[in-house]
Image (spheres, grey):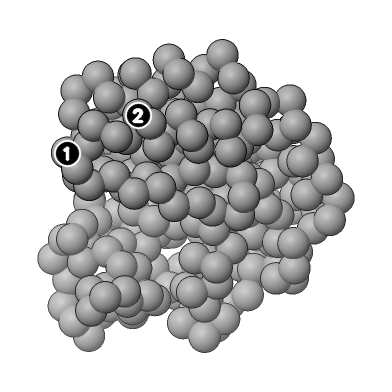
Amino acid sequence: MTVLAATDLDRTLVHSDRVAGPAEAHEVIRLERRRGVTTASLTRRTAASLVALDRVATWVPATTRSVDGYRRLDLARTLGVVPRYAVCANGAVLLVDGVADANWAARVRALIARAAPRREVARLLTGHLGALPHGKVRTADGALLVVRIPDVPDGWVDGLDALVADRGWRVSAHDEKVHVLPAGLEKSAAVAEIGRRVAASRVLAAGDSPLDADLLLAADAGIQPVDGRLHAAGWHADHVAVTAAAGLRAGEEIAAWLLAQAVAFRPGVSSAGDR
Ligand SMILES: [Mg+2]
């Protein structure tokens, strides 16, 4: 009876100072600092739940971060947990024991080959950015294009989407980040592959952004934070719970919820049910 718990990281389990909400300094573990500000932290309570989750389930971090961005969190050092599997770059990379899986990489290359070349879409994006003062294109693992734009003007994202859609690419915008990615590139496909490898009998998921919707929909049960972009957009599904709290406290709630769900599904582990 293997339970797979696939979780987004940023704004689901880990939070930057900007969106952390209230917490005492002694409660908080910092995972990442960039340019003098904390860009990823969680509470000790969240960390403890994740360590326990990793024991009773296959915990799979599933992030849009690049492999380097994921490695910066250094879960082994900060949590004492090394998830065997991780999904990076929104499904473009599947890490197994920290190493990019070659079979998965080949499948992603085949998928990407069906869309227009990245350089062509990058040119379109650069042109579309021309009218904006702050946009800067960054790339992640050769698959995604990521641009950070403070105050994305109305209609700008729709205009970009119209440019790339018939080239087999799609746009996902949340917070200040605009992701442009091949249409078929999804976290849920990589998580399904891991589910096959570990023979998962139940899949749980957690995520906050539109890029997590496929992950949540594909799961047997899931949870999203009340302060997430998906929730703000009115997205819901009957099998996806919503946290009561926001920020770091939502992270605590999500990790505890996943742990309780995983324990309840494993016979003999708890008295929570007879499944
Ligand atoms: Mg997120």
Label 2, ligand 1: CB separation under 8 Å:
no
Identified by mark 2, the residue type is His
Disc 2 target residue: 128
Residue 238 image point, x, y percent: 44, 24
Residue 201 image point, x, y percent: 75, 43
Q: Nearer the viewer, residue 93 or 51?
A: 93
- Give left or right: position of 52 versus 57: left
Looking at the image, which residue is at 20% across and 57% down? 19
Mark 1 vs mark 2, foreground winner is: 2
Pick the quarter of the image with the C terminus: top right
**How many other residues sit within 10 Å of disc 2, few (<14), some (14-19) or many (≥20)?**
some
CB under 8 Å between callouts 1 and 2?
A: no
Looking at the image, which residue is at 47% across and 73% down? 73
Looking at the image, which residue is at 49% across and 74% down? 72
Residue 227 image point, x, y percent: 24, 43
Q: Is residue 264 above or below residue 76?
A: above
Q: Is residue 160 above or below residue 95?
A: above
Disc 1 target residue: 151
Image quarter for residue 143? top right
Residue 253: in sight, yes or no? no
Which element carries disc 2, helix, strand or loop?
Answer: helix
Identified by mark 1, the residue type is Asp
Label 1, ligand 1: CB separation under 8 Å:
no
Image quarter for residue 251? bottom left
Between discs 1 and 2, the one toward the N terminus? 2
Looking at the image, which residue is at 26% across and 75% down? 35
